[in-house]
Image (cartoon, rainbow, N blue to C red):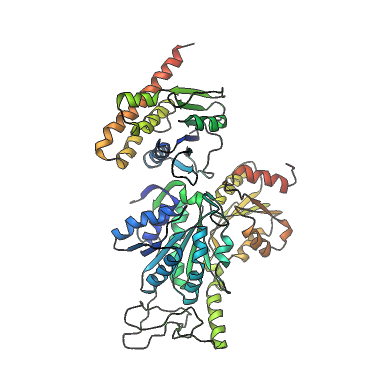
Amino acid sequence: MGDHLIFVQGNEACVEAALYAGLGFFAGYPITPSTEIAELLSLRLPQRGGKFIQMEDEIASMCAIIGASLTGLKSMTATSGPGFSLKQEAIGYAIMTEVPCVVVSVMRGGPSTGLPTKVSQGDVMQARWGTHGDHAVIALTASNHQDLFAITVEAFNLAETYRTPVILLFDEVIGHMREKLIVPEPGEIPLVQRLRTSVREGTDYHPYLPREDGRLPMSDFGGVHRYNVTGLMHDMWGFPTDNPQVAYGLMRHLFDKIEGHVTEIARMKEFFLDDAETVLISYGSAARSALHVVENRRARGERMGLLELQTLWPFPSGAVRERCNQAKFVVVVEMNMGQILLEVKKAVDDPERVFLANRIDGTFISPTDIRNILRVIQGKGV
Amino acid sequence: MERYRVVFSGSGGQGVITASIILAEAAVLYEGLNAVQSQSYGPEARGGATRSDVIVSDRDIRFPKVNQPNVLICLTQEAYNKFATTIRPGGLLLTDSHFVKPARKVDARQVELGMYKEVMDRIGKSVVFNICVLGAMLGLVPIVKTDSILKVIETKIPTAFLDMNKKALEMGFRLADASLFKQSVLP
Protein backbone atom coordinates (compact mmCIF):
# COMPACT_ATOMS: atom_id res chain seq x y z
CA MET A 1 0.00 0.00 0.00
CA GLY A 2 1.64 3.22 -1.03
CA ASP A 3 -1.33 5.19 0.28
CA HIS A 4 -0.54 8.84 0.39
CA LEU A 5 -2.59 10.27 3.24
CA ILE A 6 -2.66 14.05 3.48
CA PHE A 7 -4.71 16.62 5.39
CA VAL A 8 -5.58 19.49 3.06
CA GLN A 9 -8.04 22.17 1.96
CA GLY A 10 -10.44 21.35 -0.87
CA ASN A 11 -8.56 23.79 -3.07
CA GLU A 12 -5.36 21.85 -2.43
CA ALA A 13 -7.13 18.58 -3.20
CA CYS A 14 -8.18 20.13 -6.52
CA VAL A 15 -4.53 20.98 -7.26
CA GLU A 16 -3.39 17.44 -6.38
CA ALA A 17 -6.03 16.03 -8.71
CA ALA A 18 -5.23 18.40 -11.58
CA LEU A 19 -1.55 17.38 -11.37
CA TYR A 20 -2.60 13.73 -11.21
CA ALA A 21 -4.67 14.25 -14.37
CA GLY A 22 -1.66 15.63 -16.19
CA LEU A 23 -2.20 19.39 -16.01
CA GLY A 24 0.38 21.14 -18.17
CA PHE A 25 -0.76 24.76 -18.12
CA PHE A 26 -2.52 27.04 -15.67
CA ALA A 27 -3.41 30.70 -16.14
CA GLY A 28 -5.31 32.60 -13.51
CA TYR A 29 -6.08 35.83 -11.72
CA PRO A 30 -6.32 34.84 -8.05
CA ILE A 31 -9.64 35.50 -6.36
CA THR A 32 -11.10 34.48 -2.99
CA PRO A 33 -12.12 31.74 -2.25
CA SER A 34 -10.18 29.97 -5.02
CA THR A 35 -6.82 31.69 -4.41
CA GLU A 36 -5.06 28.64 -2.94
CA ILE A 37 -5.43 26.82 -6.27
CA ALA A 38 -3.36 29.44 -8.10
CA GLU A 39 -1.01 29.88 -5.16
CA LEU A 40 -0.17 26.21 -4.90
CA LEU A 41 0.04 25.63 -8.65
CA SER A 42 2.48 28.54 -9.02
CA LEU A 43 4.84 26.36 -6.97
CA ARG A 44 3.93 22.84 -8.01
CA LEU A 45 3.32 23.16 -11.74
CA PRO A 46 6.74 24.56 -12.74
CA GLN A 47 8.39 21.90 -10.54
CA ARG A 48 7.21 19.30 -12.99
CA GLY A 49 7.80 21.21 -16.17
CA GLY A 50 4.35 22.75 -16.50
CA LYS A 51 3.64 26.40 -17.11
CA PHE A 52 1.98 28.76 -14.65
CA ILE A 53 1.05 32.31 -15.63
CA GLN A 54 -0.59 34.91 -13.41
CA MET A 55 -2.45 36.86 -16.07
CA GLU A 56 -3.50 40.50 -16.14
CA ASP A 57 -7.16 39.64 -15.63
CA GLU A 58 -9.82 36.96 -15.62
CA ILE A 59 -10.66 37.26 -19.32
CA ALA A 60 -7.04 36.88 -20.38
CA SER A 61 -6.68 33.84 -18.09
CA MET A 62 -9.53 32.08 -19.82
CA CYS A 63 -8.21 32.97 -23.26
CA ALA A 64 -4.73 31.78 -22.31
CA ILE A 65 -5.89 28.32 -21.29
CA ILE A 66 -7.80 27.96 -24.57
CA GLY A 67 -4.66 28.78 -26.53
CA ALA A 68 -2.49 26.50 -24.40
CA SER A 69 -4.94 23.64 -24.79
CA LEU A 70 -4.91 24.03 -28.57
CA THR A 71 -1.15 23.53 -28.51
CA GLY A 72 -1.70 20.19 -26.78
CA LEU A 73 -1.49 20.85 -23.03
CA LYS A 74 -4.15 19.94 -20.50
CA SER A 75 -5.16 23.36 -19.21
CA MET A 76 -7.05 24.82 -16.29
CA THR A 77 -8.01 28.11 -14.68
CA ALA A 78 -9.63 28.82 -11.32
CA THR A 79 -11.91 31.62 -10.25
CA SER A 80 -15.01 32.61 -8.30
CA GLY A 81 -18.33 34.33 -9.16
CA PRO A 82 -17.14 37.76 -10.39
CA GLY A 83 -14.28 36.24 -12.39
CA PHE A 84 -16.54 33.49 -13.68
CA SER A 85 -18.80 36.22 -15.12
CA LEU A 86 -15.86 37.81 -16.90
CA LYS A 87 -14.77 34.49 -18.37
CA GLN A 88 -18.14 33.68 -19.87
CA GLU A 89 -17.57 35.04 -23.37
CA ALA A 90 -14.35 33.05 -23.72
CA ILE A 91 -16.04 29.94 -22.30
CA GLY A 92 -18.49 30.24 -25.19
CA TYR A 93 -15.52 30.50 -27.54
CA ALA A 94 -14.09 27.26 -26.12
CA ILE A 95 -17.47 25.59 -26.58
CA MET A 96 -17.73 26.79 -30.19
CA THR A 97 -14.14 25.93 -31.09
CA GLU A 98 -14.33 22.64 -29.13
CA VAL A 99 -11.25 23.20 -27.03
CA PRO A 100 -10.88 20.91 -23.99
CA CYS A 101 -10.21 22.82 -20.77
CA VAL A 102 -11.22 22.89 -17.11
CA VAL A 103 -12.65 25.96 -15.38
CA VAL A 104 -12.86 25.81 -11.58
CA SER A 105 -15.30 28.20 -9.94
CA VAL A 106 -15.31 28.17 -6.15
CA MET A 107 -18.64 29.79 -5.36
CA ARG A 108 -19.00 32.66 -2.90
CA GLY A 109 -21.90 34.99 -2.09
CA GLY A 110 -23.09 37.15 -5.00
CA PRO A 111 -24.27 39.03 -7.02
CA SER A 112 -21.31 41.26 -7.84
CA THR A 113 -18.42 41.16 -5.36
CA GLY A 114 -21.05 40.10 -2.78
CA LEU A 115 -19.64 38.13 0.13
CA PRO A 116 -16.06 37.26 -0.89
CA THR A 117 -15.28 35.02 2.08
CA LYS A 118 -18.69 33.40 2.56
CA VAL A 119 -20.29 30.38 1.01
CA SER A 120 -23.01 30.21 -1.65
CA GLN A 121 -24.15 28.00 -4.51
CA GLY A 122 -25.52 30.86 -6.55
CA ASP A 123 -23.60 30.20 -9.76
CA VAL A 124 -25.30 26.97 -10.84
CA MET A 125 -27.27 28.74 -13.55
CA GLN A 126 -24.30 30.90 -14.47
CA ALA A 127 -22.44 27.67 -15.21
CA ARG A 128 -25.35 26.58 -17.41
CA TRP A 129 -26.32 29.80 -19.15
CA GLY A 130 -23.54 32.27 -18.39
CA THR A 131 -22.33 32.42 -21.95
CA HIS A 132 -24.61 33.53 -24.74
CA GLY A 133 -26.27 31.48 -27.44
CA ASP A 134 -27.74 27.99 -27.35
CA HIS A 135 -25.17 25.59 -26.04
CA ALA A 136 -24.60 22.55 -23.88
CA VAL A 137 -22.14 22.43 -21.03
CA ILE A 138 -20.69 20.01 -18.50
CA ALA A 139 -20.53 21.10 -14.84
CA LEU A 140 -19.50 18.88 -11.93
CA THR A 141 -19.27 19.27 -8.16
CA ALA A 142 -18.36 17.32 -5.01
CA SER A 143 -18.99 17.34 -1.26
CA ASN A 144 -15.80 15.91 0.22
CA HIS A 145 -12.13 15.89 -0.66
CA GLN A 146 -11.90 12.28 -1.81
CA ASP A 147 -14.80 12.84 -4.22
CA LEU A 148 -13.45 16.24 -5.19
CA PHE A 149 -10.20 14.58 -6.25
CA ALA A 150 -11.96 11.97 -8.38
CA ILE A 151 -14.35 14.52 -9.89
CA THR A 152 -11.50 16.87 -10.81
CA VAL A 153 -9.69 14.05 -12.64
CA GLU A 154 -13.03 13.22 -14.24
CA ALA A 155 -13.37 16.83 -15.43
CA PHE A 156 -10.12 16.54 -17.37
CA ASN A 157 -11.23 13.19 -18.80
CA LEU A 158 -14.63 14.52 -19.92
CA ALA A 159 -13.03 17.65 -21.41
CA GLU A 160 -10.81 15.48 -23.61
CA THR A 161 -13.55 12.95 -24.42
CA TYR A 162 -16.10 15.53 -25.50
CA ARG A 163 -13.72 18.32 -26.57
CA THR A 164 -15.45 20.88 -24.42
CA PRO A 165 -14.79 23.13 -21.43
CA VAL A 166 -15.79 21.41 -18.19
CA ILE A 167 -16.77 23.53 -15.22
CA LEU A 168 -15.92 22.45 -11.68
CA LEU A 169 -18.42 24.18 -9.46
CA PHE A 170 -17.10 23.99 -5.92
CA ASP A 171 -17.99 26.26 -3.02
CA GLU A 172 -16.22 28.20 -0.27
CA VAL A 173 -16.87 25.60 2.43
CA ILE A 174 -15.41 22.75 0.36
CA GLY A 175 -12.60 24.94 -0.98
CA HIS A 176 -11.37 26.11 2.41
CA MET A 177 -12.31 23.22 4.67
CA ARG A 178 -9.50 20.85 5.61
CA GLU A 179 -10.02 17.12 5.80
CA LYS A 180 -8.17 13.98 4.88
CA LEU A 181 -7.40 12.91 1.36
CA ILE A 182 -5.76 9.74 0.17
CA VAL A 183 -4.01 10.58 -3.09
CA PRO A 184 -4.52 7.57 -5.35
CA GLU A 185 -1.59 5.74 -6.86
CA PRO A 186 -0.80 6.64 -10.49
CA GLY A 187 -3.03 4.54 -12.72
CA GLU A 188 -5.64 3.96 -10.04
CA ILE A 189 -7.97 6.43 -11.77
CA PRO A 190 -7.80 6.03 -15.56
CA LEU A 191 -6.79 9.13 -17.51
CA VAL A 192 -8.16 10.06 -20.91
CA GLN A 193 -5.39 11.32 -23.14
CA ARG A 194 -5.99 13.63 -26.04
CA LEU A 195 -7.17 12.07 -29.27
CA ARG A 196 -4.69 13.27 -31.87
CA THR A 197 -5.02 13.05 -35.62
CA SER A 198 -3.24 10.36 -37.58
CA VAL A 199 -3.08 12.67 -40.60
CA ARG A 200 0.58 13.09 -41.48
CA GLU A 201 2.56 16.23 -42.14
CA GLY A 202 2.02 17.53 -45.65
CA THR A 203 -1.49 16.08 -45.87
CA ASP A 204 -4.56 18.27 -45.38
CA TYR A 205 -5.93 18.08 -41.83
CA HIS A 206 -9.57 19.02 -41.30
CA PRO A 207 -9.88 20.18 -37.68
CA TYR A 208 -13.66 19.91 -37.65
CA LEU A 209 -14.22 16.77 -39.69
CA PRO A 210 -15.64 14.14 -37.30
CA ARG A 211 -14.55 10.52 -37.42
CA GLU A 212 -17.16 7.81 -37.82
CA ASP A 213 -17.72 7.77 -34.06
CA GLY A 214 -18.35 11.52 -34.08
CA ARG A 215 -15.10 12.43 -32.32
CA LEU A 216 -12.75 15.08 -33.67
CA PRO A 217 -9.03 14.22 -33.50
CA MET A 218 -6.89 17.24 -32.71
CA SER A 219 -3.58 18.45 -34.05
CA ASP A 220 -1.32 20.45 -31.72
CA PHE A 221 -1.61 24.05 -32.90
CA GLY A 222 1.69 25.39 -34.12
CA GLY A 223 2.79 21.85 -34.99
CA VAL A 224 2.77 20.21 -38.37
CA HIS A 225 -0.67 21.28 -39.61
CA ARG A 226 -1.95 24.74 -40.50
CA TYR A 227 -5.60 25.26 -39.63
CA ASN A 228 -8.05 27.94 -38.65
CA VAL A 229 -9.85 28.36 -35.34
CA THR A 230 -12.75 30.81 -35.09
CA GLY A 231 -15.70 31.61 -32.85
CA LEU A 232 -17.78 32.14 -35.98
CA MET A 233 -19.86 29.30 -37.35
CA HIS A 234 -17.32 27.24 -39.23
CA ASP A 235 -16.97 24.38 -41.67
CA MET A 236 -14.73 21.31 -41.44
CA TRP A 237 -11.66 23.38 -42.35
CA GLY A 238 -12.43 25.75 -39.47
CA PHE A 239 -13.26 28.64 -41.79
CA PRO A 240 -16.25 30.95 -41.21
CA THR A 241 -19.48 30.18 -42.96
CA ASP A 242 -23.11 31.22 -42.73
CA ASN A 243 -24.36 28.29 -44.74
CA PRO A 244 -27.60 27.27 -42.91
CA GLN A 245 -26.93 23.59 -43.40
CA VAL A 246 -23.45 23.82 -41.92
CA ALA A 247 -24.67 26.06 -39.10
CA TYR A 248 -27.46 23.62 -38.29
CA GLY A 249 -25.09 20.68 -38.38
CA LEU A 250 -22.60 22.37 -36.06
CA MET A 251 -25.30 23.45 -33.59
CA ARG A 252 -26.69 19.91 -33.46
CA HIS A 253 -23.20 18.48 -33.04
CA LEU A 254 -22.28 20.85 -30.19
CA PHE A 255 -25.56 20.12 -28.43
CA ASP A 256 -25.90 16.40 -29.09
CA LYS A 257 -22.36 15.44 -28.15
CA ILE A 258 -23.22 16.41 -24.56
CA GLU A 259 -27.01 16.20 -24.20
CA GLY A 260 -26.95 12.88 -26.07
CA HIS A 261 -24.62 11.43 -23.42
CA VAL A 262 -26.40 12.53 -20.23
CA THR A 263 -26.27 9.03 -18.76
CA GLU A 264 -22.56 8.59 -19.43
CA ILE A 265 -21.76 11.99 -17.97
CA ALA A 266 -24.10 11.68 -14.96
CA ARG A 267 -22.29 11.13 -11.64
CA MET A 268 -24.34 10.83 -8.46
CA LYS A 269 -24.34 9.17 -5.07
CA GLU A 270 -27.33 7.52 -3.44
CA PHE A 271 -27.90 7.15 0.29
CA PHE A 272 -30.85 5.13 1.66
CA LEU A 273 -33.04 5.82 -1.40
CA ASP A 274 -34.59 2.35 -1.80
CA ASP A 275 -37.68 2.86 0.34
CA ALA A 276 -37.38 6.59 0.99
CA GLU A 277 -40.62 8.52 1.46
CA THR A 278 -38.74 11.77 1.80
CA VAL A 279 -35.98 12.27 -0.74
CA LEU A 280 -33.45 15.03 -0.20
CA ILE A 281 -31.56 16.19 -3.29
CA SER A 282 -28.39 18.12 -2.71
CA TYR A 283 -24.85 18.73 -3.99
CA GLY A 284 -21.55 20.29 -2.96
CA SER A 285 -21.05 21.23 0.69
CA ALA A 286 -24.83 21.43 1.30
CA ALA A 287 -25.00 17.67 0.73
CA ARG A 288 -22.91 17.17 3.89
CA SER A 289 -25.60 18.76 6.05
CA ALA A 290 -28.30 16.89 4.14
CA LEU A 291 -26.52 13.57 4.73
CA HIS A 292 -26.13 14.39 8.43
CA VAL A 293 -29.91 14.83 8.68
CA VAL A 294 -30.65 11.70 6.66
CA GLU A 295 -28.32 9.49 8.71
CA ASN A 296 -29.84 10.71 11.99
CA ARG A 297 -33.41 10.23 10.76
CA ARG A 298 -32.62 6.77 9.42
CA ALA A 299 -31.20 5.81 12.81
CA ARG A 300 -34.62 6.70 14.21
CA GLY A 301 -36.38 4.62 11.58
CA GLU A 302 -37.64 7.40 9.35
CA ARG A 303 -37.70 6.50 5.67
CA MET A 304 -35.54 9.30 4.36
CA GLY A 305 -32.85 9.22 1.68
CA LEU A 306 -30.41 11.47 -0.13
CA LEU A 307 -29.59 11.81 -3.80
CA GLU A 308 -26.29 13.67 -4.06
CA LEU A 309 -25.70 15.12 -7.51
CA GLN A 310 -22.13 15.37 -8.75
CA THR A 311 -23.03 16.16 -12.35
CA LEU A 312 -25.15 19.31 -12.38
CA TRP A 313 -25.02 19.87 -16.15
CA PRO A 314 -26.21 18.21 -18.29
CA PHE A 315 -28.90 17.76 -15.67
CA PRO A 316 -29.63 14.04 -15.15
CA SER A 317 -33.41 14.47 -15.39
CA GLY A 318 -34.19 10.81 -16.07
CA ALA A 319 -32.25 9.57 -13.06
CA VAL A 320 -33.80 12.23 -10.82
CA ARG A 321 -37.32 11.37 -11.98
CA GLU A 322 -36.74 7.70 -11.31
CA ARG A 323 -35.34 8.28 -7.78
CA CYS A 324 -38.24 10.56 -6.87
CA ASN A 325 -41.07 8.36 -8.19
CA GLN A 326 -42.05 6.82 -4.86
CA ALA A 327 -41.39 9.85 -2.70
CA LYS A 328 -44.07 11.76 -0.81
CA PHE A 329 -41.77 14.72 -0.45
CA VAL A 330 -38.77 15.80 -2.46
CA VAL A 331 -36.65 18.46 -0.79
CA VAL A 332 -33.87 20.22 -2.67
CA VAL A 333 -31.16 21.43 -0.28
CA GLU A 334 -29.01 24.18 -1.78
CA MET A 335 -27.54 27.59 -0.96
CA ASN A 336 -29.36 29.73 -3.51
CA MET A 337 -32.93 30.75 -4.35
CA GLY A 338 -33.74 27.40 -5.93
CA GLN A 339 -31.62 26.94 -9.06
CA ILE A 340 -31.52 23.12 -9.00
CA LEU A 341 -35.04 23.16 -7.52
CA LEU A 342 -36.32 24.34 -10.91
CA GLU A 343 -34.58 21.48 -12.71
CA VAL A 344 -35.96 18.92 -10.26
CA LYS A 345 -39.47 20.33 -10.65
CA LYS A 346 -39.10 20.02 -14.42
CA ALA A 347 -37.86 16.44 -14.09
CA VAL A 348 -40.43 14.88 -11.75
CA ASP A 349 -44.00 13.82 -12.49
CA ASP A 350 -45.52 15.90 -9.70
CA PRO A 351 -43.67 19.21 -9.19
CA GLU A 352 -46.08 20.13 -6.37
CA ARG A 353 -44.28 17.67 -4.10
CA VAL A 354 -40.90 19.35 -4.58
CA PHE A 355 -39.77 21.80 -1.88
CA LEU A 356 -36.75 23.96 -1.20
CA ALA A 357 -34.53 24.01 1.90
CA ASN A 358 -32.08 26.83 1.38
CA ARG A 359 -29.89 29.46 2.95
CA ILE A 360 -28.80 32.58 1.07
CA ASP A 361 -27.09 34.76 3.71
CA GLY A 362 -23.52 33.51 3.38
CA THR A 363 -23.98 31.17 6.34
CA PHE A 364 -23.37 27.50 5.68
CA ILE A 365 -26.69 25.64 5.72
CA SER A 366 -26.82 23.49 8.87
CA PRO A 367 -28.68 20.28 9.73
CA THR A 368 -30.86 22.43 12.03
CA ASP A 369 -31.82 24.68 9.09
CA ILE A 370 -32.85 21.61 7.11
CA ARG A 371 -34.74 20.04 10.04
CA ASN A 372 -36.70 23.25 10.62
CA ILE A 373 -37.83 23.35 7.01
CA LEU A 374 -38.60 19.60 7.02
CA ARG A 375 -40.97 20.07 9.95
CA VAL A 376 -42.97 22.60 7.96
CA ILE A 377 -42.94 20.49 4.78
CA GLN A 378 -43.93 17.30 6.57
CA GLY A 379 -46.77 19.16 8.27
CA LYS A 380 -45.41 18.90 11.79
CA GLY A 381 -45.50 22.64 12.43
CA VAL A 382 -42.66 24.93 13.39
CA MET B 1 -14.65 7.87 21.37
CA GLU B 2 -16.31 11.10 22.31
CA ARG B 3 -16.71 13.51 19.42
CA TYR B 4 -14.60 16.57 20.16
CA ARG B 5 -15.93 19.84 18.85
CA VAL B 6 -13.22 22.41 19.39
CA VAL B 7 -13.37 26.14 18.71
CA PHE B 8 -10.17 28.18 18.75
CA SER B 9 -10.88 31.91 18.87
CA GLY B 10 -8.73 34.99 19.12
CA SER B 11 -7.46 37.69 16.81
CA GLY B 12 -5.54 37.50 13.57
CA GLY B 13 -1.82 36.92 14.15
CA GLN B 14 -2.12 34.90 17.39
CA GLY B 15 -1.79 31.69 15.46
CA VAL B 16 -5.16 30.23 16.44
CA ILE B 17 -5.75 28.87 12.95
CA THR B 18 -2.29 27.29 12.79
CA ALA B 19 -2.83 25.66 16.18
CA SER B 20 -6.17 24.24 15.06
CA ILE B 21 -4.69 22.83 11.86
CA ILE B 22 -1.86 21.17 13.78
CA LEU B 23 -4.38 19.52 16.12
CA ALA B 24 -6.56 18.24 13.28
CA GLU B 25 -3.61 17.09 11.21
CA ALA B 26 -2.15 15.18 14.17
CA ALA B 27 -5.46 13.39 14.65
CA VAL B 28 -5.69 12.37 10.98
CA LEU B 29 -2.10 11.56 10.13
CA TYR B 30 -0.84 10.02 13.36
CA GLU B 31 -3.85 8.72 15.27
CA GLY B 32 -5.97 7.26 12.47
CA LEU B 33 -8.92 9.50 13.39
CA ASN B 34 -11.14 11.68 11.28
CA ALA B 35 -10.90 15.43 11.61
CA VAL B 36 -12.28 18.44 9.82
CA GLN B 37 -11.00 21.99 10.22
CA SER B 38 -12.68 25.11 8.94
CA GLN B 39 -12.39 28.77 9.68
CA SER B 40 -14.44 31.87 9.21
CA TYR B 41 -12.94 35.19 8.38
CA GLY B 42 -13.94 38.51 6.86
CA PRO B 43 -12.64 40.39 3.83
CA GLU B 44 -10.04 42.24 5.95
CA ALA B 45 -6.51 40.80 6.17
CA ARG B 46 -5.73 41.41 9.85
CA GLY B 47 -7.46 41.95 13.19
CA GLY B 48 -11.06 41.21 13.99
CA ALA B 49 -12.25 38.05 15.69
CA THR B 50 -10.70 34.95 14.17
CA ARG B 51 -12.28 31.59 14.72
CA SER B 52 -11.33 28.11 13.68
CA ASP B 53 -13.48 25.03 14.17
CA VAL B 54 -12.10 21.52 14.53
CA ILE B 55 -14.09 18.32 14.87
CA VAL B 56 -12.24 15.13 15.83
CA SER B 57 -13.99 11.79 15.77
CA ASP B 58 -13.43 8.13 15.00
CA ARG B 59 -16.48 8.23 12.73
CA ASP B 60 -17.35 10.12 9.54
CA ILE B 61 -17.86 13.84 9.96
CA ARG B 62 -20.54 15.33 7.73
CA PHE B 63 -21.34 18.82 9.03
CA PRO B 64 -17.94 20.51 9.30
CA LYS B 65 -18.82 23.48 11.53
CA VAL B 66 -19.17 23.65 15.30
CA ASN B 67 -22.36 25.14 16.70
CA GLN B 68 -21.80 24.23 20.33
CA PRO B 69 -18.16 23.47 21.19
CA ASN B 70 -17.29 21.10 24.00
CA VAL B 71 -13.86 22.65 24.01
CA LEU B 72 -13.72 26.42 23.57
CA ILE B 73 -10.51 28.44 23.63
CA CYS B 74 -10.76 32.24 23.80
CA LEU B 75 -7.58 34.27 23.46
CA THR B 76 -9.06 37.78 23.29
CA GLN B 77 -11.77 39.54 25.27
CA GLU B 78 -13.70 40.12 22.06
CA ALA B 79 -13.64 36.41 21.22
CA TYR B 80 -14.65 35.55 24.78
CA ASN B 81 -17.58 37.97 24.76
CA LYS B 82 -18.70 36.68 21.40
CA PHE B 83 -18.38 32.92 21.86
CA ALA B 84 -18.47 32.11 25.62
CA THR B 85 -22.22 31.55 25.61
CA THR B 86 -22.04 28.97 22.82
CA ILE B 87 -20.24 26.38 24.96
CA ARG B 88 -21.88 23.00 25.41
CA PRO B 89 -22.95 22.38 29.04
CA GLY B 90 -20.18 20.53 30.85
CA GLY B 91 -17.58 21.52 28.27
CA LEU B 92 -14.21 23.12 28.77
CA LEU B 93 -13.63 26.85 28.41
CA LEU B 94 -9.94 27.78 28.33
CA THR B 95 -8.85 31.42 28.46
CA ASP B 96 -5.55 33.23 28.85
CA SER B 97 -5.39 35.52 31.87
CA HIS B 98 -3.31 38.12 30.04
CA PHE B 99 -5.96 38.72 27.41
CA VAL B 100 -9.30 37.72 28.95
CA LYS B 101 -11.16 38.74 32.11
CA PRO B 102 -13.90 36.13 32.39
CA ALA B 103 -17.09 38.07 33.00
CA ARG B 104 -19.91 35.62 33.05
CA LYS B 105 -20.62 32.32 34.66
CA VAL B 106 -21.09 29.61 32.09
CA ASP B 107 -22.25 26.05 32.58
CA ALA B 108 -18.79 24.66 31.85
CA ARG B 109 -15.41 23.99 33.36
CA GLN B 110 -13.65 27.35 33.14
CA VAL B 111 -9.88 27.22 33.19
CA GLU B 112 -7.87 30.42 33.20
CA LEU B 113 -4.15 30.01 32.60
CA GLY B 114 -1.28 32.47 32.33
CA MET B 115 0.02 30.96 29.12
CA TYR B 116 1.06 34.20 27.43
CA LYS B 117 2.93 35.43 30.51
CA GLU B 118 4.73 32.11 30.89
CA VAL B 119 5.77 32.11 27.23
CA MET B 120 7.03 35.68 27.40
CA ASP B 121 8.84 35.14 30.74
CA ARG B 122 10.53 31.90 29.85
CA ILE B 123 10.91 31.93 26.05
CA GLY B 124 10.41 35.59 25.25
CA LYS B 125 8.85 35.00 21.81
CA SER B 126 5.10 35.37 21.38
CA VAL B 127 5.29 33.37 18.16
CA VAL B 128 5.04 30.07 20.09
CA PHE B 129 2.12 31.25 22.25
CA ASN B 130 -0.29 29.21 20.12
CA ILE B 131 1.74 26.03 20.64
CA CYS B 132 1.70 26.63 24.40
CA VAL B 133 -2.11 26.98 24.22
CA LEU B 134 -2.27 23.72 22.29
CA GLY B 135 -0.18 22.03 24.97
CA ALA B 136 -2.42 23.38 27.73
CA MET B 137 -5.54 22.20 25.94
CA LEU B 138 -4.12 18.70 25.57
CA GLY B 139 -3.20 18.73 29.27
CA LEU B 140 -6.85 19.32 30.06
CA VAL B 141 -8.48 17.21 27.32
CA PRO B 142 -6.38 14.41 25.82
CA ILE B 143 -7.77 14.61 22.28
CA VAL B 144 -4.47 13.44 20.77
CA LYS B 145 -1.03 12.59 22.14
CA THR B 146 1.49 15.41 22.42
CA ASP B 147 3.85 13.15 20.45
CA SER B 148 1.52 13.33 17.46
CA ILE B 149 1.48 17.11 17.74
CA LEU B 150 5.27 17.16 17.77
CA LYS B 151 5.41 15.00 14.64
CA VAL B 152 3.23 17.53 12.80
CA ILE B 153 5.26 20.46 14.09
CA GLU B 154 8.42 18.78 12.82
CA THR B 155 7.05 18.75 9.27
CA LYS B 156 5.96 22.39 9.38
CA ILE B 157 8.68 24.25 11.23
CA PRO B 158 12.37 24.84 10.43
CA THR B 159 14.62 22.68 12.63
CA ALA B 160 16.13 25.76 14.25
CA PHE B 161 12.79 26.58 15.87
CA LEU B 162 11.89 23.06 16.85
CA ASP B 163 13.23 23.17 20.40
CA MET B 164 11.42 26.40 21.12
CA ASN B 165 8.14 24.88 19.98
CA LYS B 166 8.72 21.70 21.98
CA LYS B 167 9.41 23.77 25.05
CA ALA B 168 6.23 25.81 24.53
CA LEU B 169 4.14 22.68 24.09
CA GLU B 170 5.50 21.12 27.29
CA MET B 171 5.11 24.38 29.15
CA GLY B 172 1.44 24.54 28.27
CA PHE B 173 0.94 20.90 29.19
CA ARG B 174 2.54 21.43 32.61
CA LEU B 175 0.53 24.61 33.28
CA ALA B 176 -2.64 22.63 32.67
CA ASP B 177 -1.41 19.80 34.85
CA ALA B 178 -0.68 22.16 37.71
CA SER B 179 -4.13 23.71 37.44
CA LEU B 180 -5.72 20.25 37.58
CA PHE B 181 -3.73 19.53 40.73
CA LYS B 182 -4.84 22.83 42.28
CA GLN B 183 -8.45 22.03 41.42
CA SER B 184 -8.22 18.62 42.99
CA VAL B 185 -6.71 19.79 46.30
CA LEU B 186 -8.76 22.94 46.81
CA PRO B 187 -12.29 22.61 48.09
Residue B146 in view of the camera: no
For residue A226, which quarter of the picture? bottom left
* x 32%, y 55%: residue: A43
* Residue B69 locus on image (x, y percent): 53, 33
Residue A126 visible to the viewer: yes
Question: What x and y, as percent, mark residue A145?
Answer: 45, 51
* Observer-nearest of A231 and B52: A231
Total label count? Answer: 0
Expressed as whole percent of the image width and height from the top left, the position of residue A222 reads: 33, 78
Query: Residue B148, located in which quarter of the rendered image?
Result: top left
> In this view, which residue lies farthest toward the left?
B160
Relative to A135, does residue A38 appear above or below in the rendering? Answer: above
Quadrant position of residue B166: top left
Relative to A49, is B152 above or below? above
Give residue A97's position: percent from left, percent from top: 47, 76
The one of B20 and A159 positioned closer to us in this rendering: B20
Horizontal relation, residue A11 to residue A296: left or right? left
Residue at (53%, 76%) from the top-left corner? A254
Residue drawn at 52 percent across, 58 percent down: A81
Position of A231 relative to B14 (above/below): below
Q: Residue at x 57, y 60 (%)?
A: A124
Point out the image quarter for the C terminus of chain A. Answer: top right
